[in-house]
Image (spheres, helix red, strand yellow):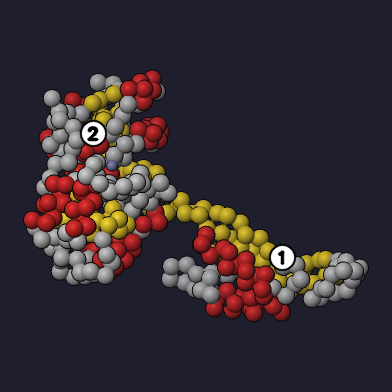
């Protein structure tokens, strides 16, 4: 499997376009035309992870956190420079799947949920996809011509259906000025025309083409149409919410969490007498979703990187948060390995990194 094919598969399963605008996902270092000798999944691409790939004869690292993120000004012996140099010197490809993996329904939050045995997991916040509803008014005799133009350009399609239109008939009215060159009617005379309102949906990136086609092919001197921006819910979204098999005290939940995720310490903000049944999770650093978790009846919200004032705010608002450390996302190493094995049909060596890249020492 060449890297280009791997990228195509990833783009199909965890679309790069579903990442946040500030993110940096996809192939960060490497060549699209070379053969992938194996894949190593990692949370962070540290020097130890690069060495691990070299030792295993694996030339492709798929990491969650993008190594190149804030913009590289130079590649020297300082900071991340030696890692980038080593990747290039050893022809190792580095691919980042970050917020696009977060919003996958079986993404990082789901993987943490799996580790703690959460059931009935569903998305905490569904994403919305923008699209356009187009309505165009044309004389009855021109409807089929307009439809065929849109069809020729593969517009007005959904997943498995093409030529998806709705049309209704009515009467249009206009009065051309003496300077107009009307397709129908005469200057200074009110004209009534039997028109069809043709409606269809297009994706956001198609709207400029639609406007051009209408302007090029609509019979009227001044085409009559509307492009209305709409939103529909997507199968992707951030975070998950689900239920534990049995209601638990916060103390027993925390003890089990630490054991299952091999996490030496966590920090709790909230009611120590709280019993836990419904749990919401957003992996990484996402305390801003705590209120949504509470609104959705979560007894406890799991995330990482909670700061002092955010913790105080949550306490004031009566929200229970467990700061499980950003590093709890490490479960994505095995989680992504398993997903890749189902996504890639060809035989390829897929391993998860054994390196602990948690920058913290728990003392
Ligand atoms: Zn993260």
Q: Is 179 positioned to the left or the right of 303 in the image?
A: right
* Element assignment for label 1: strand
Location of mark 1 (residue) = 224
Residue 265, disc: none
Residue at x-position 16% and y-position 51%? 50
Query: Dots 2 and 1: beta carbons under 8 Å?
Result: no
Residue 337 visible at all = no
- In this rendering, which labeled residue sits more in front, label 2 or label 1? 2
Residue 10 visible at all = yes
Where is residue 299 shown, x and y percent of the image? Answer: 31, 31
Residue at x-position 32% and y-position 22%? 308
Q: Taking the image as four quarters, which one is ligand 1 found in?
A: top left
Where is residue 218 shown, x and y percent of the image? Answer: 69, 73
Position of the N terminus by quadrant: bottom left
Q: Is 316 positioned to the left or the right of 95 in the image?
A: right
Q: Is 145 positioned to the left or the right of 63 in the image?
A: right
Where is residue 233 shown, x and y percent of the image? Answer: 45, 52
Location of mark 2 (residue) = 325
Residue at x-position 22% and y-position 57%? 88
Q: Is residue 358 above or below residue 168?
A: above
Where is residue 217 shown, x and y percent of the image? Answer: 67, 75
* Element assignment for label 2: loop
């Amino acid at each position: 499997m060449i890297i280009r094919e791997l990228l195509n598969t990833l783009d199909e399963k965890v679309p790069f376009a579903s990442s946040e605008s500030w993110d940096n996902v996809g192939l960060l270092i490497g060549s699209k035309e070379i053969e992938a000798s194996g894949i190593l999944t990692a949370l962070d691409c540290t020097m130890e992870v690069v060495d691990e790939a070299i030792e295993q004869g694996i030339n492709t690292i798929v990491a969650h956190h993008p190594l190149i993120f804030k913009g590289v000004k130079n590649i020297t012996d300082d900071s991340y420079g030696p890692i980038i140099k080593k990747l290039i010197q050893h022809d190792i490809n580095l691919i980042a799947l970050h917020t696009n993996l977060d919003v996958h329904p079986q993404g990082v939050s789901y993987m943490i949920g799996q580790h703690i045995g959460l059931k009935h997991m569903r998305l905490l916040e569904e994403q919305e996809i923008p699209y356009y509803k187009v309505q165009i008014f044309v004389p009855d005799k021109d409807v089929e011509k307009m439809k065929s133009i849109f069809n020729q350009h593969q517009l007005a399609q959904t997943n498995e259906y093409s030529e998806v239109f709705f049309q209704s008939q009515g009467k249009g009215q206009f009065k051309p000025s003496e300077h107009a060159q009307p397709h129908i009617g005469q200057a200074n005379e009110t004209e009534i025309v039997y028109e069809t309102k043709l409606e269809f949906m297009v994706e956001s990136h198609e709207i400029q083409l639609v406007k051009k086609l209408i302007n090029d092919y609509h019979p009227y001197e001044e085409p009559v149409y509307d492009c209305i921006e709409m939103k529909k819910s997507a199968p992707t979204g951030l975070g998950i919410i689900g239920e534990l098999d049995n209601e638990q005290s916060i103390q027993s939940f925390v003890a089990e969490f630490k054991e299952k995720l091999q996490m030496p310490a966590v920090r709790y903000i909230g009611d120590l007498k709280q019993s836990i049944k419904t749990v919401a999770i957003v992996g990484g650093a996402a305390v801003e979703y705590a209120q949504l978790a509470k609104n959705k009846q979560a007894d406890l919200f799991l995330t990482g990187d909670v700061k002092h004032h955010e913790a105080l705010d949550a306490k004031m608002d009566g929200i229970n948060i467990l700061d499980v450390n950003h590093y709890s996302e490490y479960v994505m190493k095995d989680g992504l390995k398993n997903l890749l094995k189902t996504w890639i049909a060809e035989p390829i060596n897929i391993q998860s990194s054994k390196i602990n890249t948690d920058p913290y020492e728990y003392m």
